[in-house]
Amino acid sequence: MTRTKGLALAFYLGAAIAGVAIGVAVDRLLHAAPATRVTAIEMRDRFAKELKLSDAQRATVDSILDARFRAESVVVSPIRPQLDSVRAEARGRISALLTPEQLRVYEQMQRDQKSRAQEKK
């Protein structure tokens, strides 16, 4: 196989993989069941209930999880701009694929996600 054919094959393979990834992401965004989303409080309540934690254990676990989330925030903060850039680029590429009606729904989904993220803080 010539180098040119090899490069063309690699390009088409990469494009196919990217297309599948975008398709899966859009499908999940457009068909996400709102009922499956749980808040941090609901997750902690379920955790405590399933493990049958005492009040003292629950308080300690909550403290451990709070510390974990703070530590994760410190670890992620230096790369947050890069993550935001990657996400923004993907959102732009997805937006370019959508019809005007789909774009309105997608933008509302983004606003809803932002609102949920603010509620978690």
Image (cartoon, rainbow, N blue to C red):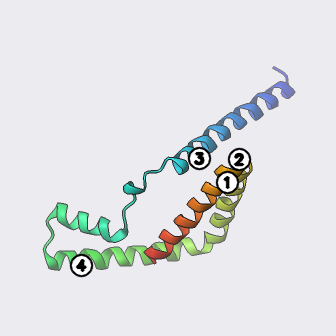
Residue with the mark numbered 1: 103
Q: Relative to 118, is 89 above or below?
A: above
Q: Where is residue 92 in the image (x, y as percent from the top left)?
A: 72, 56
Residue with the mark numbered 3: 26
Amino acid type assigned to the residue bearing label 3 in the image: Val
- Label 4: how many Cα within 10 Å (few below 14, some 14–19, many 20+): few
- Label 2: how many Cα within 10 Å (few below 14, some 14–19, many 20+): few
Q: How far apart are marks 2 and 1 (CA)?
A: 6 Å
Q: Distance between the residues labelled 3 and 4?
A: 39 Å
**Quarter-wise, where is residue 9 in the image?**
top right
User: Which mark is first along the chain, 1 or 4?
Assistant: 4
Amino acid type assigned to the residue bearing label 2 in the image: Thr
Residues at marks 3 and 4 touching, judged by CB atoms closer than 8 Å: no
Residue with the mark numbered 2: 99
User: Which mark is first along the chain, 4 or 3?
Assistant: 3
User: Which mark is first along the chain, 3 or 1?
Assistant: 3
Q: What element carries label 1?
A: helix
Residues at marks 2 and 1 touching, judged by CB atoms closer than 8 Å: yes
Tag of residue 60: 4
Q: Relative to 106, is 23 above or below?
A: above
Relative horizontal placement of residue 95, taking residue 106 as reference (left or right): right
Q: Is mark 4 on a helix, strand or loop?
A: helix
Q: Residue at x 55, y 44 (%)?
A: 27
Nearer the camera: disc 1 or disc 3: 1
